[in-house]
Every structure is written in structure tokens, then in C-alpha cells.
Image (cartoon, rainbow, N blue to C red):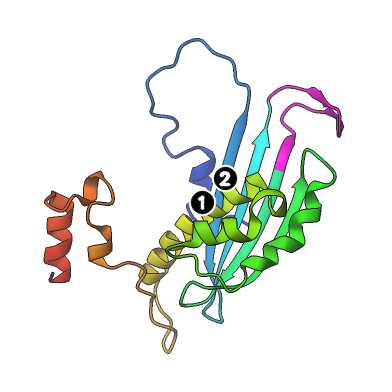
């Protein structure tokens, strides 16, 4: 079931707004989608999906004939986070993979339970799932998922609270944002506004 506003992702809001391209032909589409949910028990679920498709039929020496638009990769993961952004549970599924052996890596992802998706997450993931212990595509998915977790908790802070429910989690400190991107320049307009608003 889609959440309100989620259908706009299918149409990419107003569509592509890049300049008109040169004459070209589609050869591949990759999508990474993360959906975040506040659970009744106060935990946060992030469902993440990694899909690659090709707009033409082709033969794969391991999978046989693949129809146009069928998924070469369809890998999914649900990470459950506590209020300190630690992974308390994780489930994964590899619905479509290039090789029948790929799904054998699924049990290894349980090594992530207990990790914080905050600072140092990327390094910690690669220590546990590097090389033959992991999957290149799941690593890419986890990189996006950890960034999505910041937005999930920021969005949760704006979601109406139920009486007696948990208070929102503070996911960033103003000082930690300074000079991390163009808009967060220490002497820029955005940072000046944030400092005024937050009394710093």
C-alpha cells in the first residue's frame, strides 16, 4: 500500500527537469527506494529496495531468457531502528538476482544488528560485509538507507504525536552541519537563519 504523496515518486514529481538530451536510447534503469514508518511500539522501520531493469529482452547465461523490463536485481531489506538509531532487527530478501547463489549471503546481514546507522556506519558495514562476505548491491542500498534514516527521524519529529507517545529523536546538532555542503557554509544565509532559530 502506498503512503500519501508516494505516488508522486512514480511520476518524479514534475517529471525530469534536466535540459533536453541528445538523441538517445534507453539501456538500463536503477531505482533505490527507502520507505520509513513509525511503529506503534515507537521503533522505526525502513523498507529499502534496489532494482535494476533493462528495457529490452536478453539472454542471461545463468537465468536464461529475460523479458524486457524484468528485474535483473530486486533486492530488499527492512531495518528496524530504536530511538538511538541502532539496528534492533533486520530482514532481507533477494527476489531477483543475476546468479542463483546470491541469496546465500542473506544470513550475513544479521551481523549488522546492534550497529548505529549514525557516524561510522559505512565503515562498520564494510568491516562486517566486505568482499565475499557481502553483496555489492546491498552495500549500495545500505549507504542510501543510512542517509534515509536521518530523514526518517527528522520526518518523525514533524509527525503529530499521540498523547503519552515518545518524544521525537534529535538526529543532528547544528554544529555538525557547518561546512558539510554548499548551503551549510558557516557564513551562509541558511546557517545564519538556523542559528537565529535555534538560539546559537
Q: Return the mark for residue 32.
A: 2
The N terminus sits in image quarter: bottom right
Q: Quadrant of the C terminus?
A: bottom left
Residue 85 within the segment the image draws in magenta: no
Mark 2: few/some/many CA within 10 Å (<14, 14-19, 20+): some
- Position of residue 169 relative to residue 148, above or below, is below
Residue sticking out furthest to the top = 23
Q: Is residue 60 magenta?
A: yes
The reply to whether discs 1 and 2 touch (Cβ–Cβ < 8 Å) is: yes
Instruction: Name the residue: 64% across, 50% down.
Output: 138
Numbered mark located on residue 93 in the image: none
| Left or right, 33 with reference to 148 | right
Residue 108 appears in which quarter of the rendering? bottom right
Query: Which residue sits at x=65%, y=56%?
Result: 129
In the image: residue 41, left or right of residue 157: right
The residue sitting at 60% across, 36% down in the picture is: 30
The percent position of residue 41, horizontal first and vertical second, equals: 56, 82
- The stretch of residues the image draws in magenta is 55-73
Q: Position of residue 169 (x, y in %)?
A: 39, 75
Q: Which percent across, then down, holds residue 65? A: 86, 27
Tell me the element at label 2: strand
Q: Alpha carbon of mark 1 to alpha carbon of mark 2: how far?
A: 8 Å
Mark in the foreground, 1 or 2: 1
State the mark number for residue 144.
Answer: 1
Q: Residue at x 40, y 78 (%)?
A: 161
Amino acid at each position: 500500500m502506498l503512503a500519501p504523496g508516494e505516488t508522486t515518486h512514480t511520476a518524479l514529481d514534475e517529471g525530469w527537469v534536466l535540459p533536453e538530451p541528445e538523441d538517445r536510447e534507453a539501456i538500463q534503469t536503477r531505482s533505490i527506494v527507502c520507505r520509513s514508518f513509525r511503529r506503534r511500539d515507537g521503533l522505526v522501520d525502513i523498507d529499502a529496495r534496489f532494482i535494476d531493469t533493462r528495457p529490452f529482452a536478453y539472454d542471461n547465461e545463468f537465468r536464461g531468457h529475460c523479458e524486457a523490463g524484468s528485474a535483473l536485481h530486486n533486492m530488499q531489506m527492512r531495518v528496524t531502528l530504536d530511538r538511538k538509531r541502532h539496528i534492533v532487527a533486520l530482514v532481507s530478501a533477494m527476489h531477483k538476482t543475476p546468479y542463483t547463489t546470491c541469496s546465500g549471503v542473506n544470513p550475513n546481514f544479521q551481523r549488522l544488528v546492534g550497529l548505529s546507522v549514525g557516524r561510522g556506519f559505512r565503515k562498520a558495514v564494510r568491516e562486517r560485509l566486505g568482499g565475499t562476505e557481502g553483496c555489492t548491491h546491498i552495500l549500495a542500498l545500505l549507504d542510501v538507507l543510512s542517509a534515509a534514516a536521518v530523514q526518517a527521524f527528522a520526518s518523525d519529529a514533524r509527525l503529530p504525536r499521540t498523547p503519552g507517545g515518545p518524544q521525537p529523536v534529535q538526529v543532528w546538532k547544528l554544529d555538525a552541519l557547518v561546512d558539510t555542503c554548499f548551503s551549510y557554509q558557516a557564513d551562509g544565509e541558511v546557517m545564519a537563519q538556523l542559528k537565529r532559530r535555534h538560539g546559537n
